[in-house]
Image (spheres, rainbow, N blue to C red):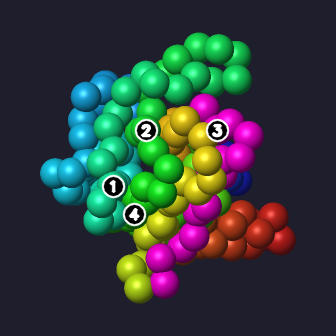
Amino acid sequence: MKTTIAYAIACLCGSMAVSQAFTLDFVGYEGSTLPPNPLVINVPGYGDVRFDAANGSSLVVNNAYQNDNGSAAPSLSFDQGEALQVTFLGAQPLNVDFDFVGVSSGESFTVQPDLFVSQSYIINLQGSGDGAGLYAISWTQVPEPTSAMLGVIGSMVLVLRRRR
């Protein structure tokens, strides 16, 4: 019985240390424009993500571009040369992935970490074409140090219980 309780506690503590995955799309933000800057979107369980249009960029959330299967979905629309800064205001994001729609031949998005702002990325549409859109952003969150510590303690309890 004691071994079962110790095992259950260890599993519970270990599960707290697992990182969380998030995806942010622009559904429900149709008609939002940048500027005015910034557009701040709250992601439940994570916190805020801030979008700032670069000088001279005018971005809008609309259905102008299609996915590969031909269905239109709300995306943050870029014209040539427009740039955007995306800043994660919650915990440190890992494995950040930007999904784009409507990118035609001759166009490409560049995504670079902002060297001057922590947890921030600069997105720029380059080339010649009719524009494209930022469809979604996916990332995982680093577990808080206390959660990671609980996972370590839970694992240690499990190992010690097995030795007895």
Mark pair 4, 2: CA separation: 14 Å
Q: Position of residue 92 (x, y in %)?
A: 47, 69
- Looking at numbered disc 4 in the image, what kind of residue is underneath it? Gln
Marked residue nearer the N-terminal end (3 or 4): 4
- Looking at numbered disc 2 in the image, what kind of residue is underneath it? Ser
Say which mark, if any, is on residue 57.
Answer: 1
Mark pair 3, 4: CA separation: 19 Å
Q: Magenta stretch: residue 42 in it?
A: no
Res. 126 visible in picture: yes
Residues tagged 1 and 3 counted as in contact (Cβ below 8 A): no
Say which mark, if any, is on residue 103.
Answer: 3
Q: Is residue 69 left or right of residue 53?
A: right
Marked residue nearer the N-terminal end (4 or 1): 1
Which residues are drawn in magenta? Answer: 101-115
- Looking at numbered disc 3 in the image, what kind of residue is underneath it? Val
In the image, residue 124 above or below residue 112: above
- Judging depth in this view, the residue of 153 and 160 nearest the camera is 153
- Judging depth in this view, the residue of 68 and 15 nearest the camera is 68
Residue 130 falls in image quadrant = top right
Q: Position of residue 77 (x, y in %)?
A: 43, 38
- Looking at numbered disc 1 in the image, what kind of residue is underneath it? Ser
| Mark 4, secondary structure of its residue | strand
- Residue at 73 percent across and 40 percent down: it is 105
Disc number lying in front (4 or 2): 2
- Which residue is identified by label 4? 85
- Which residue is identified by label 2? 77
Q: How many marks?
A: 4
